[in-house]
Image (cartoon, rainbow, N blue to C red):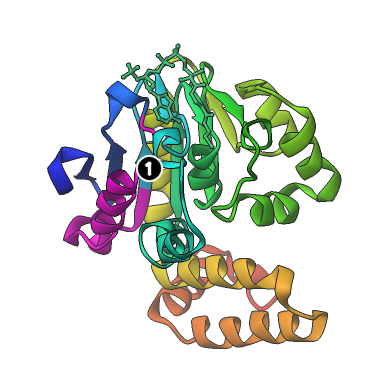
Amino acid sequence: MTDEGLVEVGAHGRACVVTLRRESKLNALSAALEAALGDALAHPDVRASACVVFTGGERAFSAGADVSELRDLDPASILAYYRETGAVYERVAALPQPTISAIAGYCLGGGLELALATDFRVADSSAVFGLPEVGIGIVPSSGGMHRLVRMLGVARAKELVLLRDRLGADEARALGLVAEVAPEGGALERALELAERLAGLPPMAVALAKQAIDYMPDASREAGLALERLAYGLLAQTDDAREAAEAFTEKRPARFRGR
Ligand code: COA
């Protein structure tokens, strides 16, 4: 546990699970919860893991920003917020290993923005998604609008931010917001299966694939292709790639070798 028990960190095989534990407030993302989440990212179990799974409770992954902290903020404190605990979403996005959100119950506002900062989302069939910010006179501002536009395109992002109230798990899957829907109560188990699968892949190839894909939308075609080729050039020289090529060649009957 970190910072007054608001976030729990635990190793599960080669993966690590980071659990939001502010259940009485549906994991509303207060500054204290964001700080605890930031501390969790530096935990040795997180740093040593091949994949990080973020999850919440049965009723809520997170019901979003703590609305009780949104009142009476002056410009200086808002700027300070983004320098301090408000930077945690970008820190999650910048983790070098793959990340998965296992989502049950409410996943609203900043909670959805946190989930969008991870690489994959697995939704329990009970999950409810939504971005209520505009309805309360603000906008998603933890990287969520930018990520949604990249992930789903301008029209879908506007739909989610401006038109849609709540979205169920299947609808979220159909939109491309979540990778998989698990049966009720099964999101974490499924996320851990995916984590174990990711942990079994060559780690340098996984890390470079993640980083290259994250950079692609900002890259010109030429820079993107160069990035792919440079990553390949580096990875092709690793023991993982050499051993895989040798094992493949040995397995094939002699008459197919060299084709
Ligand atoms: N910020 C602060 N507290 C929150 C919260 C939030 N975003 N979401 C829920 N809570 C608190 C409630 O105040 C309540 O606390 P209390 O028991 O001390 O009164 C507790 O969590 C349980 O929430 P409650 O509203 O009683 O549960 P519910 O099942 O009736 O409704 C929601 C669940 C998610 C529909 C409702 O809590 C909600 O609309 N929350 C706000 C969502 C939101 O606007 N998020 C984006 C903010 S930008």
Point out residue 135 in the picture as x, y percentages from the top left corner: 67, 30
Location of the N terminus by quadrant is: top left
Which residue is at 46% across, 62% downward?
82
From the image, tell me which residue sits under label 1: 54
Which residue is at 41% across, 65% downward?
80
Which residue is at 57% across, 82% downward?
231
Question: Which residue reaches farthest right?
Answer: 155
Point out residue 2 in the picture as x, y percentages from the top left corner: 16, 48
Reply yes or no: does residue 35 show up in magenta: yes
Magenta region, residue range: 27-52
Above or below residue 216? Residue 98 is: above
| Mark 1: few/some/many CA within 10 Å (<14, 14-19, 20+) | many
Quadrant of the image where one finds ligand 1: top left
Q: Main secondary structure of the magenta part?
A: helix
Q: Which is nearer the eye, 193 or 93?
A: 93
Point out residue 30 in the picture as x, y percentages from the top left corner: 35, 42
Residue type of the residue flagged with mark 1: Phe
Within 8 Å: ligand 1 and the Cβ of disc 1?
A: no
Reply yes or no: does residue 29 show up in magenta: yes
Q: Which is nearer the eye, 95 or 60?
A: 60
Q: Which is nearer the eye, 17 or 225?
A: 17
Image quadrant assignment for residue 212: bottom right
How many numbered marks are there? 1
Q: Is residue 147 visible?
A: yes
